[in-house]
Amino acid sequence: MSELAASSLPQEVADFIFDLHDACRRSQRIDEMKDLYSGSFVKLSNKFYSSSPWPPASAVASECESDPLFLAFYSELVLRHTFTSLRPTLSDKISSWSTYVALFEAVLTSDPKSSEEGTFMILPEWAFEVCHEFVYQFQGFCQYRHSVACKGETTSPQSILLRDNQDVWDLPTVMRLLTGVINLSKLQSDPTGQSSPSQMHRVLGYFGALSLSRLSCLLGDFTSSLTAVSFISLTDKNSLHAGLFAAQLSLSYHLGVSYMAVGRTRDAARTLSSMCNAIGRGFKTGYLLKGTKGQEQFGKLEMKMVALVTVLVGMGGGGVKVDDDVVKTIQERFGDKLSKIEEGEEGFEELYTFGCPKFVSPGVPKFTEDEKGTNKSADFYKKQVKMAVARAERARGLGKTRSTLKLYSNVGVDKVEKLVGGGGGGLKDILSLKLRGLQVEGGE
């Protein structure tokens, strides 16, 4: 680093870099690190970098002993500032890929037993935000490049730049990096974290699993979404995500969507309605109104989850139970739509479209004229919605058969089919009802 670069750093910024590095490598005190990460960084960003990026790693290296692992985390931290507070360009979106690859590779190759490196510590919140942003940027980049390809403007600057960088934000590498930190943490075989190489590996592996679950859900691989977090308990108050509301919310929401897709409607209803209640309590008590990071998204996600619970209620049967407070919210927000659904009218598609995540196709366009008018990411999203609505319609269609069976428990299949109007499906519907009643369920 040049002397000019070092001298251009405001002293407050230089002190911050020194102190944050010291907290990660030496003192490793949670309270100190939290003040620096959640407090000082925000204040310094507002004071010195409200309209410009933070200095690059090369400009601050002398303040942290040129520690490569710390500089990798620093680069990602200031990158998030650029994406949340400034207006990132397409070049920024492409270069962010190398920032994340460098960070994850640094973690995967770090050796906490090395006398030269030593241990490294980060906040659980920091680990969550790294992994969460990683998947968020992957999702956004996939959507963006498909929207550019759809225009068919093969000679536009955006098309040329994207065509020249088709290897960035590719799914195999994203999956490799996430599964790498998960496997290194050894949490799947030892959920206590005692076998993790270090605290850093433990928290990154934990929230890497949450992000892999979210990513799998966005890709429509719902079984893998559930498998990724099978070692995590939603109700364990001592778990890492329990102290981070944004992590609880993300986990519950994407699990709820995945449970719905695989037919575990009871788990879906319990998971989503429980999270809705938690948000409601947070707003009532003021917990979510006291400067909580991301609070502006909490209310929006609450309504999305209520919409999904409304779909579950409209599907009927399956032992779906919903808390009274959530039922009240459903009646206030979506009562008219639920009434139409219960009367056999349309309504599932509107509710599910409102409540579901932005499913994404990971395919990489070629940016040719042949792709004009075709947005494969948007088409993939519509396909997921269509399949979800079909599942809901099918479940609702079993309602009449269910009601008939309750009234006529000792009649033959042919009689049941006549009673439900001849279009009920007879034995097929009865078997479907039996299967829905034999759902695999997670623990409370």
Image (cartoon, rainbow, N blue to C red):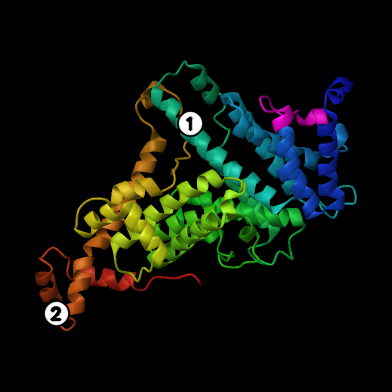
Going by the numbered disc 2, the residue's amino acid type is Gly
Is residue 243 toward the left or the right of residue 414 in the image? right
Question: Where does the image place residue 46, in percent across and percent down from the top left?
Answer: 69, 32
Query: Residue lying farthest top?
Result: 155
Instruction: Return the mark for residue 221.
Output: none
In front of the other: 283 or 15 = 283
- Cα–Cα gap, marks 2 and 1: 56 Å
Region rendered in magenta: 46-60
Q: Where residue 60 sits in the image (x, y, percent)?
A: 82, 31
Q: Is residue 77 rendered magenta in the image?
A: no
Give the total number of marks visible in the rendering.
2
**Going 10% across and 66% down the picture, which residue do you hit?**
421
Residue 171: x and y in percent read: 54, 42
- Horizontal arrangement in the rendering, residue 377 relative to residue 282 (left or right): left
Could you tell me residue 32's position as x and y percent?
80, 50
Amino acid at pointer 1: Tyr
Tell me the number on the disc at residue 412. Answer: 2
Residue at screen point 17% across, 74% down: 404
Residue 51 within the magenta-colored segment of the rendering: yes
Task: Compare marks 2 and 1 and give the one earlier in the sequence.
Answer: 1
Q: Quadrant of the N terminus?
A: top right
> Residue 109, can we see it?
no
Label 2 crowd (10 A; few <14 / some 14-19 / many >=20):
few
Residue 290 left/right relative to 436: right
- Label 1, residues with CA under 10 Å away: few <14, some 14-19, many ≥20: some
Q: Quadrant of residue 306?
A: bottom left
